[in-house]
Amino acid sequence: MSDRARLPTIGPVLWYRDPMAAIAWLEKALGFETGMVVEDGKGGVVHSELRLHDGYIMVVGPPSGRAVSPIAFGGRATQSVHVQISEGLDALCERARAAGAVIEREPADQPYGDRVFTCRDLEDHPWSFGQTVQALSLAQMAQATGHNIKGGAS
């Protein structure tokens, strides 16, 4: 069985003006490992798969048609990629900062039990990273945050 047969159910696609530079940066800054890159023969990427722990993303570009990179719109975006990790959040933040990520929210403990930081990558894609530091029930989260929190059916 190939690694591709075990891809997670959901894998976001991120468009970059310079996808090869983005792939190299994502490896260096955030620890992604590239499993596949399909080049278009003109410096672009028509498909790629980058893994991080048990998740993956696809990096493609340059953008065409209705696809854009947030850098084309001053960093405005309609999505953000969230990565939940089990350890090393502060070290990851420093690694990303050293590679040129713009840290928008420094690592901080949240009332719902996670430690979180957010950043922007080299083309202004927004990223958030979380690490659970205190496991809380939904009722405890609601009490700590002051929000009504409901759970789905199990």
Image (spheres, rainbow, N blue to C red):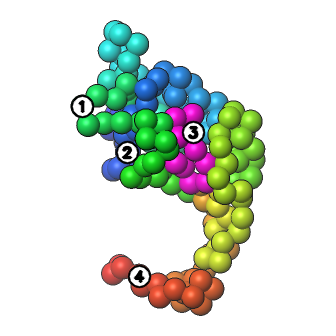
* Amino acid found under the numbered disc labelled 3: Asp
* Amino acid found under the numbered disc labelled 2: Gly
Query: Which badge, 4 or 2, comes first in the chain's sequence?
Result: 2
Q: Which residue is mark 2?
A: 11
Label 2 neighbourhood size at 10 Å, few (<14), some (14-19), many (20+)?
some
Q: CA distance from mark 1 to mark 2?
A: 21 Å
Q: Which residue is mark 4?
A: 151
Q: Nearer the viewer, mark 3 or mark 4?
A: 3
Give the number of callouts. 4
In the displayed structure, would residue 12 be above or below residue 58? below
Q: Residue at x 36, y 36 (%)?
A: 68
Range of the magenta residues?
A: 118-128
Report the residue that reaches farthest toward the front. 74
Q: CA distance from mark 3 to mark 4?
A: 32 Å
Q: CA distance from mark 1 to mark 3?
A: 22 Å
Decide which of 32, 63 is in the foreground and name it.
63
